[in-house]
Image (tube, coloured by chain):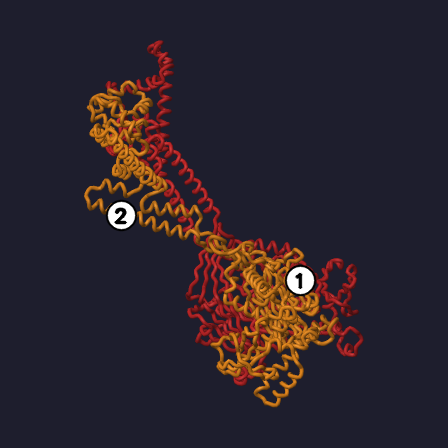
Amino acid sequence: MNLKKYLVRALHRLQKGPGYTYKELLVWYCDNTNTHGPKRIIKEGPKKKLIWFFLTLLFASLVFWQWGILINTYLSYNVTSSLSIGFKTMKFPAVTICNANPFKYSEVKHLLKELDRLIEAALERILQPTPGNSSENTSAPLNLELWNQIPLVLIDEHDKDNPVILDIFETNQTAGGNETCSHQGSDNCTYRNFTSAAQAVTEWYILQSTSILSKVPLHERIRMGYQAEDMILACLYGAEPCNYKNFTQIYHPDHGNCYIFNWGMDEEALNSSNPGAEFGLKLILDISQQDYIPYLSSAAGARLMLHQQKSFPFLKDQGIYAMAGTETSIGVLVDELERMGYPYSDCTMNGSDVPVKNLYSQYNTSYSIQACLRSCFQNHMAEICGCGHYMFPLPEGVNYCNNEDNPGWAYCYSSLRSSIKQRQICIDSCKETCNDTQYKMTISMADWPSEASEVTLIPCFATDIDGSPLPGTGTLSNVRAGVQLRGSAASAHSALLPQIVWLLSSLGGQFGFWMGGSVLCLIEFGEIIIDSLWITIINVIGWCKGLKQRRARARYPDAPPTVSELVEAHTNLGFQHEPAAVPRDEALPPEPGTPPPNYDSLRVQPLDVLGADSDAETE
Amino acid sequence: MPGDGSITARLKRTLPVRGPQAPTLSELMRWYCLNTNTHGCRRIVVSRGRLRRLLWILLTLSAVGLILWQCAELLMNYYSASVSVTVQFQKLPFPAVTICNINPYKYSAMKEYLSELDKETKKALETFYGFSEGKSKVRRSVDEWNSTGSNFFQQIPLLKVEDFSRTATDLRSGQKRKIEGSVFHKDSSIVNSGDSNDIIGFQLCDANNSSECALYTFSSGVNAIQEWYKLHYMNIMAQIPLETKEKLSYSADDLLLTCFFDGLSCDKRHFTRFHHPLHGNCYTFNSGENGTILSTSTGGSEYGLQVVLYIDEADYNPFLVTSSGAKIIVHDQNEYPFIEDIGTEIETAAATSIGMHFTRSRKLSKPYSDCTETGADIPVENLYNKSYSLQICLHSCFQKAMVESCGCAQYAQPLPTGAEYCNYKKNPNWMYCYYRLHEKFVKEQLGCQQICKDACSFKEWALTTSIAQWPSTVSEDWMLRVLSWDKGQKLNKKLNKTDLANLMVFYKDLNERFISENPANTLVILLSNFGGQLGLWMSCSVVCVIEIVEVFFIDSLSIVMRRQWQRAKKWWNDRKRGGSGKAPQASDVERQGHDNPVCIDEDLPTFTTALRLPLPQDSPLPRTPPPNYSTLRLETAFTEQLPDTLELGQH
């Protein structure tokens, strides 16, 4: 019903033509708007009117300019970061403990026997330049099969252009080198140069032993490594005693068996609410240095790493050493980092959107950039060399490289490793994690046990480990990892929502500052535009109607237009409205002297004080 | 009105009305309050009742106060900076790593320069510790000393000070002497054990004026002798030319046994020599001297720098350095390595693994904080050939002061142009001068700390150092043999493990932490904050401010001026006419402006004037329509009907 009424009224309005003109509308708008400038324009004298007109224009343009800046700032997605430093209860980090040496020498001796003999002989040759010594005759004939795959050579670079290359078992020259040949063609050889023989021998030994050990099945390798009960002599977390059963075993290719405390895989992670070493983890480790593989690792000590729960420990990157015969205290400062995702920065929540297959997921660990980089390398290696490197987990359907099955692997590996292109590809395809925790460590050391306590301590441990030979002073290592949660600086990028709030309040502030406007003012302005469109529509319709009628009249002329009428049409501008007014006159018999309905409103426009009344009249 | 024309004419003559239309200030205020865009003011005028009006006045005033307060806060906080931290994973440039032996020069090579000094130091030590052992021994040594006249002790005698009694015993001659001048305790007097026998020191005198002496005392003999030795040592070294000193110190071949970077072998060609006055020859890896700076794209110990250093412990100077090992510093290629200030010491017979974390910081310079971008705006000449840092500035400033007041340059810092290092032969007075100056420097009396500013941007490598035993007991044998062979060409003895140090420097992860300050407020934000405050409390904008300026300053002023002008004119006329035309003029003045319906000025009537004019309804007699009508009328189609409609509207 209402709708019909409304439609009827709209039809009438269409028929009658607009109730007001553009100028009336504009004046009305200026007078009644909540924006500050326009009102001044119509309220002042002619000179001030001009000034205010320009001022309003200027401010309007200023507002738009500043809005442009603000919106640009917003769209550039700059990150602002909030830094909060505080003291709170935190999860105690996972602590990984390894021995620097991966396997007990006594267990792997039978595998490395050949290799050790070979390297001993080689060292003998290097160190004693004159061959034909009596000592050489005593050694059993060497198995040169291993040697021939990757021989150690000496490169004489006295003549820069023609370096002389000599196999160690033939003669002897100056600098050490390491030859890796691709099996396919003998031309495809590279020499890895080392300026130091020690370096060359170590690298060579690592390559060879890797190849040998990769053939050993995993459970066998775990057996050959250090067992938790042998390694962890004493453990204390806060005031509570703990033992090797609280540690999770993991096989790490570099360091053999590693043990992780508080990994959080099966049980809840421990919380630590008290700072200080007293409330942290205290360990006494036995690294049994006598059982080290002599040529594999020259540094002795325990390897430690603090990391997040459920993440894989990358000891080569983040690990620290704990020296035997000392007490190592580690103070930890936890730094939690929270990155905002797209579009602010390129990070990944769980690594599912990274194009690299995470090989470390077989350990059930979470994604990390180190894991990604290593997986990337291993995938490339499997693709190019056809086998996986022993130090990294295997992709599906690929075996570890060894000299028998993949004779050219060492060459392939070293060329891949030094390839800058490969590194770049991996760096580009891996993304950092959005939530990251970094542990800043302060390490200090003291001699342990002190001379006075040594006498009583060592027998203690001897009984602990059931009558095994007394560990020497050089093999025990005391580690106290006290986590100081004093400053947990969480640098996090602010969330998305406050950004929009910031934008809106800045926009509002600008508009308010220059023109005292608000969103309502914008709506007002929109209203005016709609009104003027409405006027235009009505005018257009009226004009069309007039045209049609004139045409109709032209077709069926009731009475031909008089000359005076025609003249009038050409000379009098106001005359054009006559035909439009005619139908109205017909519909509503003209009452001479009836004012046009909006006349009042026109007259009272200048009467500001009575504005309210006049509005009431017109409406 | 009959006299219409004459009155307006007179008014025009006497009263050129321009600008404000209101005749009086209260009228103007009223008009302003009714028409202003700010909220509150209108309420004051419109409200009925005294209490309500008072309330509104109070509210408006408190809003104004709040705005002023908040905007003042905003302005004061304008130059504040917010810190942003970004952590990014990327390929990182490897820093320069400078490695020095703790001992600066080979002792064997220095023998010819230092033999005299060492002999005397030994004797001094003997005497000092011999006091408690037996008198005969002391006597003998003192006798020996007296027979061999030593110039070192004559220059700066070591004294044993009887505390509080202000007497000192010369260690060499056993003479007692009265202490004159000031006593400086090098060690803190609080820590002093109180055992007066322990105090030992030396006296430095102004050579030109022997009465001016300063006594430096140390609670421990070790410190005193070391300091005393150092003074003489610097004195001797200052006289040796640089080329000779470089030869006396360790060569790259001596220091570096093996080198490995990023999985590839490296050698001494990757190292740049750099002579440090106190540490002798130091070697910088990746110094960027040949234009290329190495970078790492993989973290971890295998991909960093691994070196084995040969620390020839047997060849150490026993008096100068008491610890053994190497010193390293990780720094930017453009930075000068202040190894004595911020070096990390490396133990022998151990593998030191140093994990790095890279942090880059950037501060905003003026007006946010007082830091300098390049150091060019600091009046201290940079003596180091490196980019500016606070330390460089402080050292340069001290050296400058030293050259100015002592006439020679201190040995530990580079030479300014035209100056030379201090030595006893040329500047017998320099030690006293140096100590005096150094004390002033420490007490911030030289003004160096005030002149020098922080650098705005700097790079920092946070180091995590951990140590492992190296070589391990089982690998020790072959390792030492092979390393001896490596060194073999020059050295025919087997190396001892305490002569070796293994060092690994690597990036723990390739995260670059970038800490930068950003202006917390840009102009845009400041303005929008202003707008927010103004809008919140009074719905005011710049337009309102202009309004206020217009009404309160321009309009009110002109009204006051007009008043004054009229009064002056009236007074003038009164004097002139002598009281004849007084009465009508007064009424004219009162009736001017909007109150006077016939007061029409030259300007076109505006809405405001029109408003004040008597409305057509009020004056029924047909008159000319309000002037602005015509413009409106022209637009409408009803030109002819206008008068009728006017009348009809009233009916």
- In which quadrant of the rendered view does residue A133 lie? bottom right
Which quadrant of the rendered structure holds the C terminus of chain B?
A: top left
Mark number displayed over residue B59: 2
10 Å crowding of disc 1: few (<14), some (14-19), many (20+): some
Label 1: state its secondary structure: strand
Q: Amino acid at mark 1?
A: Thr
**Which chain gets the red colouring?**
A
Instruction: Report whether mark 2 lies on the same chain as mark 1.
Output: yes
- The residue tagged 1 is B272
Residue A292 visible in the displayed image:
no
Circle 2 — which element? Answer: helix
Name the residue: 44% across, 69% down: A270
Residue B138 appears in the figure: yes
Given residues B401 and A4, the one toward you in this image is: B401
User: Tag 1, which chain?
Assistant: B
Tell me if residue B83 comes above or below residue B640 in the rendering.
below
Place residue A304 in its image quadrant: bottom right
